[in-house]
């Protein structure tokens, strides 16, 4: 059942201790004591952290657990995440501090002080208001990695309109079904974005998606790449032209929200069917992203933080946009590919901007590692003091390369385990934590995790089991948008009072946690989360395909790669050309990340008697592994 991963935990014996210098700078000096306090009195613990932020009105109750699993945090409290991400800072010396430093792939640079970022957000917020966007309306954002992506999200938050950001690497059907589920009337997109020296034609994709989902009444288009695009009169508007109208100015009211009001919806892949809209709130999510980033990456005023993810994923929401701004930090953001035009691009930018903390994914590290050490060694990386990893288990080879070649053995690696659903880091080292390569180490404060068997009983150290969370936490998802039953069933049915993560893990004798991988039909490809069901439904939407199955198989750089098996409809002949066409079709529907590595043509697929495809068996066969229990296999 368990997904294959690249991790071999052969390094379990090795322990890396942080330097005295790193330890002396750390906010948290005693993990055990603080963790114990967070377990003894979680409400008191979270109230203290929430108290470090501004509220229009303080909460009456920290946690309302009267209707599990529909937990509520900071009940009765009034805030808006913008109150703490921007409004608070522009009243202090941070007004003139850089909030965002951005470099485009072609090499253009833009910077925003807190004052300037706030001004742009105010303008965009007024613009949205003038287009009739009201509190509670969901705005879909489909942009490349440019500053306007951040500005648009913040503007939505400011006026209380939940944003639904769709990753710019997604394509037509992925965008269309997200627009449909959110019933968005406003879409924010761009003419294109730069990737590997080429233009990704976002507006063309958006046009096709809007044709499939005509709920969009207004489409705001940001000019990034400048090529000719189609603009539909009465529907599509250039952002620059709108910003020039007299409605825009720099003053804009931040709407007071209930702590439990939704801040955003972010769609993520699940076991079955369509992506689910994970709902996060203004209050709890704010407290959680603020505290996790502060404690784990020790954010200081003088830091230059770089989270190399895309704002279109939860990593970017929490740690490019909200976490850094809540902490008043300076965040760096880069538009394009790590190897463009040469494999030294990242190292050059670290040197140029004096990056002090780099947070990225194992797949990116492996991708850069294959070009050798020289590219990194050519640059001065001595500004780095902490490193981070996220998205999938990091294999010890990549860990050691990151530690030695990038961090010069001075910077500990924070291997953070978490999920779209958890809002922020859940299992993670702190700068003071002795590290074991490949282990995310221990739970964050207030996070009560356990490794259990099928019956929910704790398994002994060293044994693999289901990773569950036993206490609610402020950053947890509140529900699945428009589908509370799915929320209950997906996360709370199997173990009742425990949140089911979908991952398997084991705890070693020192209490360190080792994440093994997904136990369900979710595949992590280059750290991106995809469902086998989505790939399969994209395949069967092609006229040649009668049935399809998708599985993940190990891949050196991507961690896992998608392999597909299809049964053709009568009248179609298998050929290399058709295989390639099907791969392109999946790319067109979902996005390039979902393109199968290989499409195999088969006469039949192994199924259970109740008709479910046995992907486990397909995987075992592809890997030449034992087939295991096949008693449920239909004849
Ligand atoms: C899944 C969640 C939340 C950040 C990005 C991914 C895997 C995430 C780690 C890690 C081992 C990890 C898990 C998890 N995962 N971080 N440090 N070590 N596995 O968010 O797309 O919701 O995916 O990513 O399998 O369940 P996501």
Image (spheres, grey):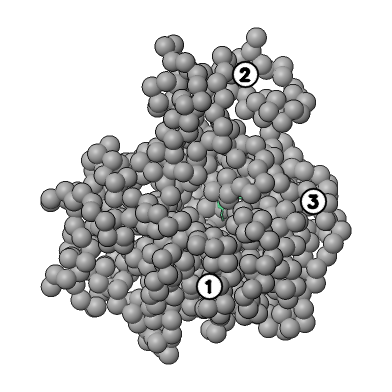
User: Does the residue tagged 2 have its C-beta within 8 Å of any atom of ligand 1?
Assistant: no
Q: Position of residue 505 (x, y in %)?
A: 72, 47
- For residue 554, side relative to residue 317 (left or right): right
- For residue 494, side relative to residue 61 (left or right): right
- For residue 390, side relative to residue 455 (left or right): left
Q: Residue at x 72, y 73 (%)?
A: 408
Could you tell me which secondary element the residue under label 1 belongs to? helix
- Residue bearing the label numbered 1: 349
Mark 3 burial class by Cα count in 10 Å: few <14, some 14-19, many 20+: some
Q: Position of residue 88 (x, y in %)?
A: 40, 81
- Residue bearing the label numbered 3: 9
Q: Is residue 41 visible?
A: no
Residue 370 sits above or below residue 566 on the image: below
Q: Are marks 1 and 2 in contact (CB under 8 Å)?
A: no
Residue 606's tag is 2
Could you tell me which secondary element the residue under label 2 belongs to? loop
The residue lying toward the viewer, choosing from 16 and 135, is: 16
The nearer-to-camera label among 3 and 1 is 1
Q: Position of residue 461 (x, y in %)?
A: 83, 50
Q: CA distance from mark 3 to mark 1?
A: 32 Å
């Amino acid at each position: 059942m368990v997904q294959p991963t690249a991790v071999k935990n052969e390094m379990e014996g090795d322990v890396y201790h942080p330097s005295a210098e790193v330890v002396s700078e750390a906010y948290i000096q005693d993990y055990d004591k603080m963790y114990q306090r967070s377990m003894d009195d979680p409400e008191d613990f979270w109230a203290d952290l929430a108290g470090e932020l501004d509220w229009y009105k303080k909460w009456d109750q920290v946690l309302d657990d009267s209707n599990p699993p529909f937990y509520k945090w900071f009940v009765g409290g009034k805030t808006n995440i913008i109150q703490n991400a921007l409004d608070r800072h522009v009243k202090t010396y941070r007004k003139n501090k850089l909030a965002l430093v951005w470099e485009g792939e072609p090499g253009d640079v833009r910077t925003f002080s807190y004052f300037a970022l706030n001004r742009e957000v105010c303008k965009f917020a007024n613009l949205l208001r003038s287009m009739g966007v009201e509190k509670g309306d969901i705005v879909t954002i489909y942009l490349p990695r440019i500053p306007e992506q951040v500005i648009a999200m913040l503007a939505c938050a400011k006026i209380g309109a939940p944003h639904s950001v769709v990753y710019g690497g997604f394509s037509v059907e992925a965008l269309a079904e997200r627009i449909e589920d959110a019933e968005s009337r406003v879409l924010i997109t761009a003419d294109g974005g730069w990737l590997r020296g080429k233009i990704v034609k976002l507006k063309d994709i958006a046009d096709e998606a809007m044709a499939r989902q005509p709920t969009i009444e207004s489409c705001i288009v940001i000019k990034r790449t400048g090529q000719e695009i189609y603009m539909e009169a009465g529907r599509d508007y250039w952002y620059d032209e709108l910003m020039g109208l007299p409605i825009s100015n720099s003053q804009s009211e931040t709407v007071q929200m209930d702590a439990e009001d939704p801040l955003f919806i972010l769609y993520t892949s699940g076991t079955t069917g369509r992506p689910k809209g994970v709902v996060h709130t203004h209050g709890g999510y704010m407290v959680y992203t603020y505290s996790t980033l502060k404690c784990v990456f020790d954010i200081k005023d003088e830091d230059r933080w770089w989270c190399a993810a895309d704002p279109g994923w939860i990593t970017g929401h929490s740690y490019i946009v909200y976490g850094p701004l809540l902490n008043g930090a300076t965040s760096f953001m880069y538009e394009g590919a790590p190897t463009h035009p040469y494999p030294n691009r990242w190292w050059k930018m670290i040197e140029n901007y004096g990056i002090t903390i780099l947070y990225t994914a194992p797949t990116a590290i492996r991708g850069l590692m294959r070009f050798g050490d020289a590219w990194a060694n050519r640059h001065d990386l001595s500004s780095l003091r902490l490193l981070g990893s996220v998205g999938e288990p990091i294999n010890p080879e990549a860990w050691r390369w990151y530690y030695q070649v990038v961090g010069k053995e001075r910077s500990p690696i924070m291997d953070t385990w978490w999920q779209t659903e958890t809002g922020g880091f859940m299992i993670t080292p702190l700068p003071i934590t002795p590290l074991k390569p490949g282990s995310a180490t221990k739970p964050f404060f207030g996070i009560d995790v356990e490794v259990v068997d099928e019956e929910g009983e704790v398994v002994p150290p060293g044994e693999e089991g289901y990773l569950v969370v036993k206490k609610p936490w402020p950053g947890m998802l509140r529900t699945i948008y428009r589908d509370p039953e799915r929320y209950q069933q997906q996360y709370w049915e199997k173990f009742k009072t425990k949140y089911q993560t979908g991952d398997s893990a084991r705890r070693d004798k020192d209490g360190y946690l080792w994440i093994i991988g997904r136990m369900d039909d979710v595949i992590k490809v280059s750290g991106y989360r995809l469902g086998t069901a989505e790939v399969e439904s994209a395949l069967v939407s092609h006229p040649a395909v009668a049935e399809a199955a998708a599985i993940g198989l190990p891949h050196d750089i991507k961690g896992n790669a998608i392999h597909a098996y299809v049964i053709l409809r009568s009248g179609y002949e298998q050929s290399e050309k058709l295989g390639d066409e099907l791969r392109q079709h999946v790319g067109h529907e979902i996005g390039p990340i979902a393109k199968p590595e290989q499409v195999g043509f088969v006469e039949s697929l192994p199924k259970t008697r109740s008709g479910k495809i046995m992907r486990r068996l397909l995987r075992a066969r592809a890997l030449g592994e034992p087939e295991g229990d096949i008693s449920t296999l239909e004849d």
